Image: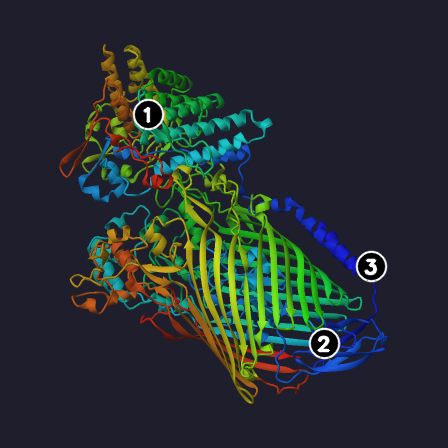
């Protein structure tokens, strides 16, 4: 009997030992399933292109004034889009908001990458590839934060930014934690900090063949856009200039088939030489619907010899439909292009009191848009304010359909030089107004976010 | 590798064991000379006892004080025998026992780890013996369990195509993990296709229903366990041959089962739509979408390109046709299945064997399909070292070949969403195949042909030969086991199984198939000279998919069976088990394939091509249809199970199991979960105070415990899923986050309590059991919402609960015995479940609760539930369907649908039967016997189909309810079918389709099947080596006897006909 128990003990202890083999249980159940740990994994998480990485908000295009809805087609707008279009107090009808969700999904992805890079073995935490991916992630996160700030916060005003509500600045990938709203100052500080950091990490070479990837030009371009929106024109000028120093190509519209249905060459993969960084707006059905028309006053602002008039607009059933997206397809472009940099630089120079230089820049841009069979008369004035007025008008005309108008209105309405843009909709024959700096210029936080996280709602 | 050391140890160890002085003997049945196991062997004088093993051997230690001993041999099924034996004898004793008259053989159930007498079990086991299994004819062994096991139901709704079976045992236990029970073949989990098992090789099936029965399978037992036990040879049995064969004939399906509008109504509707200008926009559709022949004729008449009278005559000829007749005639045949099975078994004193071969060929009613299966099975057992060591080996081989060339109804659609027009003709009067309109307009096809494109016409009857789709699979299992008996009460065993499953699916679209011609044509580009250039070369298209699964299982186990002083009986097992399984699969496609030379061409998968059909669609890529999938399962488990029985009256049992697996990324200490059960049984009838003579058997059992379940798609770490560059517009590999981090992930648990009463009345005329159970699924995987700022909309984790309860009643009655015998077997099962915790709410009511589904997990409701909109009848003025909005009768369908929440729609009830069962009557008359099986299902609801005006008014035909629609005031009292609107409204259609008007009770009684058999030879009168021969007839799917709904449809079959009637004729011969 003793022998038996000895053997039993040996057998059972051996069995237990077999099980100690922890490697046995560390095999992946599916090989295509990865815990992202390598630089390739992190890069792959940022390769989702137009399904995530290269998306920008599109909601503001419904609320802005470049387009209008045919009164007969109001009913066919979804309740949420109608609420946004009519600047209602509670516009969403309880629906969730793709612009919010997707922007935070982008932030979640970048945080997974940044957390992963943070936990990367110390000895490998440098090197070009590591830095580049870290720069990419910081850039993508800053772009997403900025997109959210444009929609869900007031225009930046340095005197109140410490009290104004910013957005939740999620800096970790943990899903169990709720982040309260930051101040607007903190929001912009974070955006600038991320971009400045990215600037030092992203390599110098220009990625002409990969407009969906951030480049040094893109970081400068984004900084120029952010500083401009904050009214910090000196810094905006600096970065627009730096961006143009890397890339300043402009189309000659005379070489485009402006009469065709899609005159602008597609941004992806490489066709659009003006594109610095590619983003596709999350297109609300409102924008592409044939019962949404371009504002006729805007249309009338273009000279008949301005090729943009033909290139951007298509006559349709007595109205005009936008056809000049820089994506080269039906989706609006939300990325960075050289024309915007010319306009930022020109505006900043004019705001610094200059006249000749900004108008030279503007004329350089407009010449490429002008029918070459007709003589182009360069714009000229002596007054810096007049020059600024012209530049801002050309900004609206050139950057139509890029989702920038809403931010510009907000910015200009806190600008002491302007501050007079009132939006108007006709509802049942009655005008409905959105006066400057109205609280409805700030979109409310989506209802489901408030319900599930309890963060502070915007004043309405 | 450590595992092999262990095997070696197991084999070497016995050689070092001490030899003891013992009385050796063997107990055999007096009539058959087969071994009798579990015979109690006692020596009252010496106070020693033991029991025989499964080969009838026993060993009794001879602590001899005298030279002779009295031995008493007792067994529940045999007359007790008393013998005087010499203690110094060296020969093996041979004892013959006589069977008691009228007593059933002792029943053993198997858990896959041990075989235990049912009377000693505390858990809820159901044993389906060989005779019952063979009652049905068919090639699938699991299908034979239908209507036999209380609590086991074959689901007809909500079944998952990836699971091994559509069986539920005692309702639902999980929400998102696997829902089907674990299938065990002899000792190890069976991962292959159940259809690969030859039913003729199966001896019995044990169904493990509660925690005490199943918890030995731990984390895989949550849905119950089905243990399939194969046949084995017997020691000391001469060669026995058994041959079984049957032929089944299956009727063609009833294509008219789901009513459709008539051809006249169809054509009238097309005319009406044409007059309304419905087709004007479609005529210039850039995708050249096909229009039906009548519409084409109407266009031609309008344009004056056809003789009006001739066109009219053509349309009138169409009116007489119904394509369902053609389909039935040309695409269906009478189905025929054949099965041939031969097995040989036998054994000597030290060796036994079982060899079998089976061949099945099944030609279903759908023409072009055929399935074949070849199975071989060889098992050998050697008894060595004077019966101390038993070595076992078995090889199991199956090859299945399925040819699937039948045309599906969807493949005949003439345009997307348009099923074949009812006046289509598949063949002319002489049976010559005819072309039908398909996908593109004929004018476009003609124009393309003139430009040099391949012929684009579609001839359905030629398509059957145009494709060659087949899947082949081989399934190999190799088992080896060694068992060493240390003493009469202790043995150890080691088992190993190697499994290999290979499948090869191959779909060849030959060069003349429509699919290949269409692919080639769509990518064809006209060059500057107007000549066609073909990025996809002319030739066949071949899709290949292969998968291979290899598994190794290893188990070491210690068994104890100790009986002390007749009073105490201890049975126990303990062991360790490891299982590793690796799978890989790949698929790919080849273009320009030439069957004769097995060559193919290279195509550019990354290039963008302009569609020949619609030139404005410019970014078309030639699909690669390629993929790879590789992965692995790893399990390590520790298990133990023990029972103690006192005085054959009281039994206590306990069982525990710890499972660890490669559940991805979980820290090792959280990978495992201990699952346990406790049980007790009380044989009341053996108490001295028990006086109920008319109930000679009465046994009470109670068990409590946990089984587990696992959703391996989840992980504790952030995981991402990689996509290949070809899936990306950017041409880059990309990864999507699959799981946000979840450090608290754990396995699902199901707590089950079971209370049971087993009884038998005097002379065993009536016997049976009543079982009541409660179960609760805890930590089930479910979704909970997350704030959108986290970047994840919902979180999948252990945050749902489910509870259920039910009752299973079995009653077997031997009504008449003797020359004319009659017995009745009845079972009744009641099973309910409801979700008790689920954190997310539906965001889209209509798609989650109504469209095609059985409801979103909702607290307080069954997992599978049916909901509908409250019905306020038809509007007497216009026949519009009416519902309720804020308590008022309303026709604002958009508001009703958009505002619907789970609280204000009608909850009709469960979508799966809550009560089900079967009644089987068996009659015997001499050598003739017959049994009739009637099944029933109640307590559930089904949704009927009806007319969809959106489809009808798009010219796509519709349901036959159209004929019964509201047409004039007053009709609302006769019908619930809404009137035909001028313009279709999705809201109106959806409201009606999901209204309470179309929900009905599913309750029904079905005459499932009848079997008759006849023994050609009288008992004990062999004829030329044939010891028995049986002829049998089996008729299946006989139809409904009763249903509660007034609709003509079979409640369980709403979208297509029920399985067609089949008749089998078979023979079973034993040599």
Residue drawn 67% across and 66% down?
A: B570
Q: Is residue A172 above or below residue A274?
A: below
Q: Which is closer to the viewer, label 3 or label 1? A: 1
Q: Is residue A26 above or below residue A426?
A: below
Within 10 angstroms of label 1, few (less than 14), some, or many (20 or more) residues?
few
Q: Which mark is residue B16?
A: 3
Within 10 angstroms of label 2, few (less than 14), some, or many (20 or more) residues?
some
The chain identifier of the residue carrying mark 2 reads B
Left or right position of B690 against B413: right
Residue where numbered disc 1 is placed: A163
Residue B294 x/y as whole percent: 27, 59
Nearest to N terminus: mark 2 or mark 3 = 3
> SS of the residue at dot 3?
helix
The chain identifier of the residue carrying mark 1 reads A
Left or right position of B107 against B615: right
Q: Which mark is residue B1058?
A: none
Residue where numbered disc 2 is placed: B237
Residue drawn 25% across and 23% down?
A: A413
Establish whether labels 2 and 3 are both on one chain. Answer: yes
Q: Toward which corner of the image does residue B354 lie, by quadrant? A: bottom right
Q: Toward which corner of the image does residue B607 lie, by quadrant? A: top left
Discs 3, 1 touching: Cβ within 8 Å: no
Within 10 angstroms of label 3, few (less than 14), some, or many (20 or more) residues?
few
In the picture as drawn, the residue positioned furthest to the bottom comes out as B819
- Depth check: give the residue in front, B472 or B594: B472
């Amino acid at each position: 009997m003793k022998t038996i128990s000895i053997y039993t003990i040996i057998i059972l202890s051996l069995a237990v030992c077999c099980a100690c083999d922890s490697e046995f249980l560390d095999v992946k159940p599916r090989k295509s399933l990865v815990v992202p740990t390598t630089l390739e994994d992190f890069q792959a998480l940022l390769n989702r292109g137009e399904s995530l990485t290269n998306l920008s908000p599109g909601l503001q295009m419904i609320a802005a004034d470049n387009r209008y809805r045919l009164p007969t087609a109001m009913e066919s707008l979804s309740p949420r889009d109608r609420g946004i279009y009519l600047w209602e107090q509670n516009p969403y009808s309880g629906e969730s908001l793709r612009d919010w969700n997707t922007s935070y999904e982008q932030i979640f992805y970048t945080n997974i990458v940044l957390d992963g890079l943070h936990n990367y073995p110390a000895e490998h935490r440098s090197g070009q590839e590591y830095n580049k991916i870290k720069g990419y992630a910081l850039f993508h996160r800053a772009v997403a934060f900025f997109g959210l700030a444009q929609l869900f916060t007031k225009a930046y005003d340095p005197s109140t930014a410490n009290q104004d509500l910013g957005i939740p600045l999620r800096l970790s990938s943990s899903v169990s934690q709720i982040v309260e709203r930051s101040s607007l100052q903190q929001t912009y500080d974070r955006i600038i900090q991320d971009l400045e950091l990215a600037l030092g990490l992203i390599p110098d070479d220009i990625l002409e063949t990969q407009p969906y990837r951030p480049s040094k030009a893109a970081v400068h371009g984004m900084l120029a856009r952010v500083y401009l929106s904050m009214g910090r024109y000196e810094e905006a000028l600096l970065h627009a200039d730096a961006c143009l120093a890397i890339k300043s190509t402009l189309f000659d519209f005379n070489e485009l088939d402006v009469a065709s249905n899609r005159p602008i060459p597609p941004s992806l993969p490489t066709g659009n030489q003006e594109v610095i960084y590619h983003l596709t707006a999350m297109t609300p059905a409102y924008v592409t619907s044939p019962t949404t028309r371009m504002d006729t006053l805007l249309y009338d602002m273009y000279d008949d010899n301005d090729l943009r008039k033909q290139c951007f607009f298509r006559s349709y059933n007595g109205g005009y439909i936008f056809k000049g997206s820089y994506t080269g397809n039906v989706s609006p472009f939300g990325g960075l292009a050289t024309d915007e940099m010319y306009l930022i630089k020109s505006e900043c120079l004019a705001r610094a009191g200059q006249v000749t230089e900004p108008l030279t820049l503007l004329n350089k841009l407009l010449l490429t848009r002008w029918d070459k069979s007709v003589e182009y008369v360069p714009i000229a004035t002596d007054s810096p304010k007049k020059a600024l007025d012209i530049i801002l008008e050309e900004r609206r005309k050139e950057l139509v359909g890029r989702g920038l108008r809403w931010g510009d209105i907000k910015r200009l309405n806190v600008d002491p030089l302007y501050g007079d843009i009132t939006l108007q909709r006709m509802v049942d024959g009655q005008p409905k107004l959105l006066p400057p700096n109205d609280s409805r210029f700030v979109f409310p936080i989506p209802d489901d976010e408030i319900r599930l996280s309890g963060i502070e709602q915007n004043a309405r | 590798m450590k595992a092999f050391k262990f095997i070696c140890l197991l084999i070497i160890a016995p050689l070092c064991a001490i030899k003891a002085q013992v009385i050796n003997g063997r107990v055999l049945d007096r009539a058959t000379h087969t071994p009798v196991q579990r015979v109690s062997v006692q020596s009252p004088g010496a106070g020693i006892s033991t029991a025989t093993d499964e080969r009838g051997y026993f060993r009794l230690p001879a602590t001899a004080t005298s030279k002779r001993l009295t031995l008493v041999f007792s067994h529940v099924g045999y007359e007790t025998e008393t013998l005087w034996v010499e203690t110094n004898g060296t020969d093996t004793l041979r004892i013959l026992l006589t069977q008691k008259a009228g007593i059933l053989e002792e029943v053993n159930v198997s858990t896959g780890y041990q075989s235990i007498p049912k009377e000693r079990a505390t858990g809820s086991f159901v044993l389906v013996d060989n005779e019952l299994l063979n009652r049905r004819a068919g090639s699938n062994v699991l299908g034979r369990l239908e209507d036999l096991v209380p609590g086991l139901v074959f689901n007809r709704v909500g079944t998952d195509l990836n699971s091994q079976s559509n069986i539920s045992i005692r309702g639902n236990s999980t929400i998102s993990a696997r829902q089907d029970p674990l299938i065990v073949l002899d000792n190890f989990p069976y991962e292959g296709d159940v259809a690969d098992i030859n039913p003729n090789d199966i001896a019995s099936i044990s169904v493990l229903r509660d925690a005490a029965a199943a918890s030995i399978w731990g984390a895989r037992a949550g849905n119950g366990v089905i243990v399939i036990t194969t046949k084995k040879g017997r020691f000391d049995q001469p060669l026995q041959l058994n041959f079984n064969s049957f032929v089944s004939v299956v009727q063609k399906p009833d294509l008219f089962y789901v009513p459709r509008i008539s051809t006249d109504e169809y054509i009238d509707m097309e005319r009406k739509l044409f007059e309304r200008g419905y087709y004007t926009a479609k005529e210039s559709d850039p995708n050249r979408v096909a229009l039906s022949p009548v519409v084409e004729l109407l266009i031609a008449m309008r344009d004056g390109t056809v003789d009006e009278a001739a066109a009219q005559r053509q349309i009138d000829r169409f009116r007489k046709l119904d394509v369902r007749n053609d389909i039935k005639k040309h695409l269906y045949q009478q189905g025929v299945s054949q099965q041939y099975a031969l097995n040989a078994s036998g054994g000597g004193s030290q060796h036994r064997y079982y060899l079998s071969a089976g061949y099945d060929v099944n030609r279903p009613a759908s023409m072009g399909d055929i399935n074949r299966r070849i199975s071989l099975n060889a098992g050998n057992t050697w008894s060595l070292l004077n019966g101390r060591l038993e070595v076992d080996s078995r090889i199991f081989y199956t090859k299945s070949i399925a040819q699937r060339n039948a045309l599906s109804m969807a493949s005949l659609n003439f345009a997307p969403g348009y099923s074949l027009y009812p006046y289509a003709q598949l063949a002319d009067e002489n049976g010559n195949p005819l072309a039908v309109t398909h996908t593109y307009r004929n004018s476009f096809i003609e124009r393309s042909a003139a430009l040099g494109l391949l012929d684009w016409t579609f001839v359905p009857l030629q398509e059957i030969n145009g494709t060659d789709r087949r899947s082949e699979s081989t399934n190999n299992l190799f088992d080896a086991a060694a068992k060493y008996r240390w003493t009469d009460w202790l043995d150890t065993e080691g088992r190993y199984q190697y499994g290999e499953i290979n499948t090869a699916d191959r779909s060849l679209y030959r060069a003349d198939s429509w699919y290949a011609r269409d692919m080639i044509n769509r990518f064809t580009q006209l060059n500057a000279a107007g000549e066609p250039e073909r990025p996809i070369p002319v030739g066949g298209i071949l899709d290949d998919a292969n998968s291979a699964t290899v598994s190794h299982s290893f188990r070491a186990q210690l068994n104890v069976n100790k009986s002390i002083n007749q009073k105490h009986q201890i049975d126990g097992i303990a062991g360790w088990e490891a299982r590793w399984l690796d799978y890989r699969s790949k698929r790919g496609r080849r273009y320009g394939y030439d069957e004769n030379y097995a060559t193919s061409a290279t195509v550019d998968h990354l290039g963008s091509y302009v569609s020949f059909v619609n030139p404005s669609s410019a970014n078309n890529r030639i699909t690669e249809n390629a993929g790879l999938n590789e992965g692995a399962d790893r399990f390590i488990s520790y298990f133990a199970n023990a029972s103690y029985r006192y005085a054959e009256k009281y039994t206590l049992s306990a069982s525990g199991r710890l499972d660890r697996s490669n559940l991805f990324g979980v820290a090792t200490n959280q990978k495992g979960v201990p699952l346990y059960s406790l049980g007790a049984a009380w044989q009341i009838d053996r108490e001295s105070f028990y006086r109920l003579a008319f109930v000679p058997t009465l046994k009470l059992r109670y068990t409590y415990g946990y089984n587990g379940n696992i959703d391996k798609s989840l992980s504790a770490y952030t995981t991402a899923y990689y996509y290949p560059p070809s899936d990306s517009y950017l041409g880059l590999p990309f990864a999507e986050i699959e799981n946000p981090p979840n450090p608290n992930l754990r396995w699902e648990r199901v707590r089950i309590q079971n209370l049971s009463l087993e009884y038998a009345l005097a002379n065993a005329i009536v016997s049976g059991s009543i079982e009541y159970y409660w179960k609760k699924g805890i930590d089930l995987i479910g979704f909970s919402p997350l704030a959108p700022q986290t970047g994840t909309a919902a979180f999948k984790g252990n945050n749902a609960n489910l509870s259920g309860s039910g009752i299973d009643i079995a009653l077997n009655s031997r009504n008449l015995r003797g020359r004319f015998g009659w017995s009745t077997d009845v079972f009744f099962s009641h099973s309910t479940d409801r979700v008790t915790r689920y954190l997310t709410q539906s965001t889209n009511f209509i798609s989650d609760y109504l469209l095609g589904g059985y409801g979103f997990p909702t607290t307080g409701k069954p997992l599978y539930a049916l909901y509908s909109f409250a019905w306020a009848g038809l509007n007497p003025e216009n026949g519009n369907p009416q519902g309720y909005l804020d308590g008022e009768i309303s026709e604002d369908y958009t508001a009703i649908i958009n505002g619907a929440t789970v609280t204000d729609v009608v909850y009709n009830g469960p979508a799966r039967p809550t009560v089900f069962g079967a009644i089987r009557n068996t009659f015997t008359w001499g050598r003739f016997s017959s049994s009739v099986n009637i099944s029933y299902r109640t307590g559930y609801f089904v949704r009927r189909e009806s007319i969809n005006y959106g489809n009808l008014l798009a010219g796509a035909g519709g349901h036959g309810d159209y004929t019964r629609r509201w047409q004039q005031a007053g009709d609302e009292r006769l019908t619930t079918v809404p009137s035909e609107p001028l313009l279709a409204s999705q809201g109106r259609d959806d409201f009606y389709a999901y209204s309470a008007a179309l929900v009905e009770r599913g309750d029904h009684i079905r005459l499932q099947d009848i079997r008759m058999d006849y023994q050609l030879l009288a008992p004990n009168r062999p004829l030329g080596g044939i010891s028995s021969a049986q002829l049998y007839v089996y008729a299946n799917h006989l139809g409904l006897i009763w249903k509660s709904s007034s609709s003509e449809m079979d409640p369980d079959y709403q979208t297509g006909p029920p399985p067609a009637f089949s008749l089998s004729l078979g023979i079973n011969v034993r040599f």
